[in-house]
Amino acid sequence: MVDLVDREWKLVFEKDFGTSKAVEAFSLDRDPEIIEGKRFMIGKAVVKGVTCAIKLEDDRILTKCEECDEEKQPCFHVKVFWHKHMRSIYVSRLPMPTERKKEIFRGEKGEAEAGKGADQGIEADKDVGEVSSEETEGTEEKLVMIMDKLDEEMMKKIDLTWLASDEYPLIYEFERTRKLKDGSVKKETVRQLTWAGWILAARKQGDIRVEPAEFVKLEDGTLMAIALATDLKTNLTMPGQSTKVYGKNYTYEVLASKAVRNALKKVIDPLIVEQVIEYAKRRKAIKQIDLREATTP
């Protein structure tokens, strides 16, 4: 067996790893080692007693194994490491598609335009028109934090097996005043799905596969959860990440749930989000947020 350091890196492509089903019965011998640089990430793992490594450099994938030579790459050991850990990291490093690409991908430009507000998790009054925001960036950030904390509390009580119940709100709602370009003032209602709302949207859309979150420890000690959500109809896979921690009682389950939520946001059709919002309004499954909570120092 050759020392891993003496092996040459072999350039491979994502399609070379095959499907995860071929290696689903196998696992890593222990937690992998991850080294992250500015433009690259190297993961090293042991599979059935054999050490292998995968290097992600820009959009390139390079592999090597102490037992299998370069001509056999990606070998069995590397494939296990890829599907059990490194694939989620690779997907998370890919650039996000633009809104234009999303519209083309969905096939119906009109439908994508109709759901544009919902794609951002927000529904606003349709007669608001062109506006210029007077709200500070800090206020927006505080609003996000408030909704995030409410989601966290919900995540501690329900999981992906949850079914629609009157016990949990499906949307957050708050009123804000914005100034139009003509100088007049308009009230606006903003709505965003809760954790429970995203679960319901995923169930309603169907044909979505969510892979369990992987945990990666970054150089600064931060723990990052990375989850993947796949729209099986279109074969679109998108990552979701979560690293921020609020409060002392933060758990791995909450970190994983937030990564799942953030991945679901990228694959659920905006029209489905619109339907869940309308359903929540009819059932009054709404959590009102006082905007003053976000603006109070």
Image (cartoon, grey):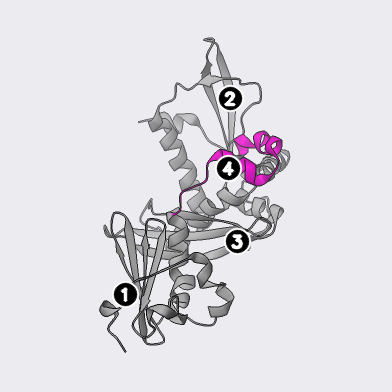
Q: Which mark is residue 101?
A: 4
Q: Which stretch did the figure color magenta?
A: 94-118
Of circles 1 and 3, the one toward us is 1
Compare marks 3 and 2 and give the one earlier in the sequence. 3
In the rendered image, residue 58 lying in the magenta stretch gets the answer no
- Tell which circle, 2 or 1, labels the residue nearer the N-terminal end: 1
- For this view, does 73 lie left or right of residue 195? left
Residue 249 higher or lower than 42, as above or below:
above
Q: Quadrant of the N terminus?
A: bottom left
Residue plotted at (45% across, 56% down): 92
| The C terminus, quarter of image | top left
N-terminal label among 4 and 2: 4
| Upstream in sequence: badge 1 or badge 3 | 1
The amino acid on which the numbered mark 2 sits, given as a three-letter code, is: Glu
Q: Residues within 10 Å of mark 2 (few under 14, many from 20)?
A: some
Corner quadrant of residue 279: top right
**Depth-wise, is mark 4 or mark 3 nearer the camera?**
4
Is label 1 in contact with label 3 (beta carbons under 8 Å)? no
* Distance between mark 2 and mark 1 Cα atoms: 60 Å
Q: Residues within 10 Å of mark 3 (few under 14, many from 20)?
A: some
Q: x, y percentage for residue 159? A: 57, 61
Gap in angstroms between the C-alphas marked 4 and 2:
29 Å
Residue at the spot x=49%, y=30% of the render? 291
The CA span between labels 3 and 2 is: 32 Å
Q: Is residue 174 visible?
A: yes
